[in-house]
Amino acid sequence: IVHDPIVYHDFKFKSNILFLNFNIRTRSNQTRRSISYTATPHPIIYSSCTKSTILTTQRHFVIITLVAIVHLLALADNQTPLCPATTKNRILSEKAILEHARVLSEDIGFRTVGTREHALGDQYVHEQALRIQKECEDVVKKAPTRKLECEVWRQEGSGTHRFDMMGKPVFKVYENLSNIIIRISNGTPAGKAHALLLNAHVDSTVPSPGAADDALSVGILFEIARNLVHTPGWEPAHSIVFLFNNAEESLQDGSHLFATQHPLANLVRAVINLEAAGNTGPEILFQATSEEMIQAYAQVPYPYATVLANDVFKSGIILSDTDFRQFEEYRNLTGLDMAVVGDSYFYHTRKDLVKNIQPGVAQHFAENVMAIVKHLTSPLGATQVLPSLARQVTPPTSIYFSVVGKYFFLYSVQTAWKVLLVVLLATALLLAGTTGPELRRTIWKATGGVLSSLAGAALGAGVAASIMAKILEAGMSWFSKETSCFVLYGPPALAGALAAQYFLVARSPPTEIAQFEYATLFGIHLVNVFAAIILQFLQLGSSSIFTLFSLGSLFALILNTFLNALGNPSRRREPNWTVIHLATYAVAQVVPLVVGSEIAITMLIYAYGSRPFDAMHQKRIFVLHFEDITQQEHHLHLAAADGAPGFHELVQGVATKFSKIYHQPVPVMMDDNNSDWDIIYPFSQFLTPYKIPLPKPYNYASPFADTFTVTAVHDVFNYRSNTRSLTLLIDHPGIIWTAIAFDAHILEWSLSSPPLEGYQRYHFKEASFYGTTQWKLDLVLSVSPRHPERSKLQIDFMGIIEKGSWPGKKLDKHPAGPGIQLLEKLDEHLFKSTGDSVDAMLLSCVGGQVIV
């Protein structure tokens, strides 16, 4: 099949054993060859461009699987090529998906909530939704007996919610935000009674055009909807709701609006959320919140999932979140959370563009989502799953993982316990049947040594990292090449592990030393077994990893016992360990010396011969031009969120070039009371900020001095109850993402969530549709006679000038004041001075402080 400029050749060799698919892919004068082997002991469906083939053979399964694994490691390139269009059967088109992403991210641009571009993104998505509705109506006219109905809504609304992040409460207020919604159903009341929700967000974050995050997902939803409409004879048993929410980056306001205010939310039984934190590789399933949805995911043609990702994300170690949270919190919905995460160097940067999305990513993502949709909603699929979720949701109990992007293994917790019990029983028999009392004592001692080695490995890597950061001043030198971490910190970790073993052996009598090699192997096995049992008791599916490790070590121990018994039949109960004593001792002496030399050389190479940042792996910095309209001052704020060296020198160079009021830049203390960065609170707690004074532009009068205001109306003191009731009005024409912060003891307010207990610091953040100029808060404050000064509110307020982001407003013909002009020059300076190794968030802000 020839499809210029991409060439595909599919050769299918059919047998009971093997299905081969050869793809030759040519693009930009580069040729990639891939061979995929498929074999399975259970019936699975292999999806290709033209047909599905069911494979049921068990013969040669192990051989073929091993070949496939080896080949996968050699390929190191997991792509699903874009299938060429055919006239017989419409297929999902990666080209169409990426075109949607291109229009949103490049033709429209930075779609920050509240900007004109954000409104244009809303308009584009609404037009595309109406186009699909029109195509749906035309299809039904041509086939009147087909049960198919497409409905479109543009939801508008305002609301409030509490958003906890990084242990900090943030209180959100949004005004006049919008969502675009498509529902595809069979048109009957029964067909509309239960719905599957697909969600993607249209907006992008402040420093990014958001091609992958999340215009890619928007394109996938459109292509799936169009594909379903144009699939001849397809009729859904249950409805599918496509939600294009328009405010995720502002802390999930759009999904909150749908979940709490749209009538369709009452009919949704499960949700699939599509996200991106990278632009290469297969999308990963990192949240699955019910057994039913895990079973649904098992239907995808290209699985890429592990229960470990689910456990890690659920633990809160990763300081990130998605719209999935709102559907869980406010609708108690179950579902799947999926995201592209490979090569996240462009995530939330200006280089999140379509050209940087790896070919095949959209195809892979779309085909997997489509398989789940058809499984849950088509008449031939699992039609009772969605109705059953309305009655009861089964908590996730399965352990699952995928292998080489083709096979999805799924088994129950009960099975996991049975496997563990078998391993534990075999371990006990091996420990009792092949070892004497003295060797058993050595094994338990060696088990402690294994745990000490793990601690030593962590300590060794930690010491190396401290030396790199504090002494050599070369922290994050590995950043541009992630695998460098293994080269840089692997040897110190190994040295720490060996040092722990060395000290353990050095303090042991000779009779124990001769047994330590076997005892350590047995100790590693025991650690794996106990780790699996503990994690299993904690109901963490990640226990499967240690279960697999323990199976491997158990097999090694049994094999070792068998081989020793064959070689020494007269001593079957206790093999002769002294044969390896000298080698073990030599390794304990020589390896640390070799590793130690390698560590020193490697650290010096990375410290003085490696650049952590370049044009494709940029350092991220945050820059605000701040106009204080109450103090009549201008400042330039610069901050970084990493510990890499060189940032102080970068700030110093900026201060020298742009501040005529030159002062040596010094870091500013960042805490809850510092409101310099409240527009990105609480992420601001991670920043290392600097503040540079700027001269006030000559003959400049701020257009926001009289328009950006915080005032109190309906202000009433009740001296009997010691309370003060008031309404705060925040007027912000031309300002977006406004934020206010103050200290107060709030008893009641107009927000949907209750206020905090006692006298607290409050942070409020607003997000509204383009053109919205006001929001308000109704408050009842406690006024203590002992603290009369607390009756007044000292409010810090700030916001982003709608026309004041660079390069988001690069094409705008009306630059907004001196801030964006300075940011444009600063951007050019950073590009030239760093060789494009820095990505800067450049925002022009305005604010001040007022007492009401």
Image (tube, helix red, strand yellow):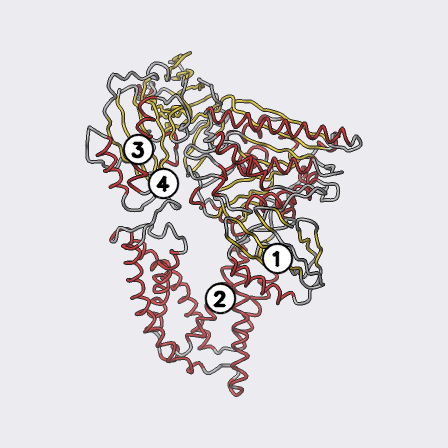
Where does label 3 land, which residue? 826
User: Front-most of 199 and 763?
Assistant: 199
In the image, what residue occupies the spot 56% across and 62% down?
Answer: 69
Circle 3: residue type: Leu
* Residue 54, picture quadrant: bottom right
* Type of amino acid at the residue the image marks with label 4: Arg
Q: Which residue is mark 4?
A: 620
Q: Is residue 141 left or right of residue 825?
A: right
Nearer the observer: mark 1 or 3; the answer is: 1
Question: Is the C-beta separation of discs 1 and 2 under 8 Å?
Answer: no
Circle on res. 704: none
Residue sitting at x 35%, y 17%: 704
Give the mark, 1 or 2, whose residue is nearer the N terminus: 1
Measuring from the top left, give residue 851's x and y in whole percent. 32, 18
> Mark 1 against mark 2, which lies toward the viewer?
1
**Residue 122 seen in this snapshot:** yes
Q: Residue 395: x percent and y percent? A: 61, 45
Q: In the image, 17: left or right of 440?
A: right
Q: Earlier in the sequence, mark 3 or mark 2?
A: 2
What element does badge 2 sit on?
helix
Q: Are marks 4 and 1 in contact (CB under 8 Å)?
A: no
* CB atoms of marks 3 and 2 within 8 Å: no
Q: Which mark is residue 526?
A: 2
Dividing the picture into quadrants, the one containing residue 338 is: top right
Are the residues at dot 4 and dot 3 in contact (C-beta closer than 8 Å)? no
Secondary structure type for disc 3: helix
- From mark 4 to mark 2, how far is it between C-alphas? 44 Å
Q: CA distance from mark 1 to mark 3?
A: 50 Å
Determine which of the numbered discs, if any, sits on residue 22 in the image: 1
Point out the frontmost of discs 4 and 2: 4
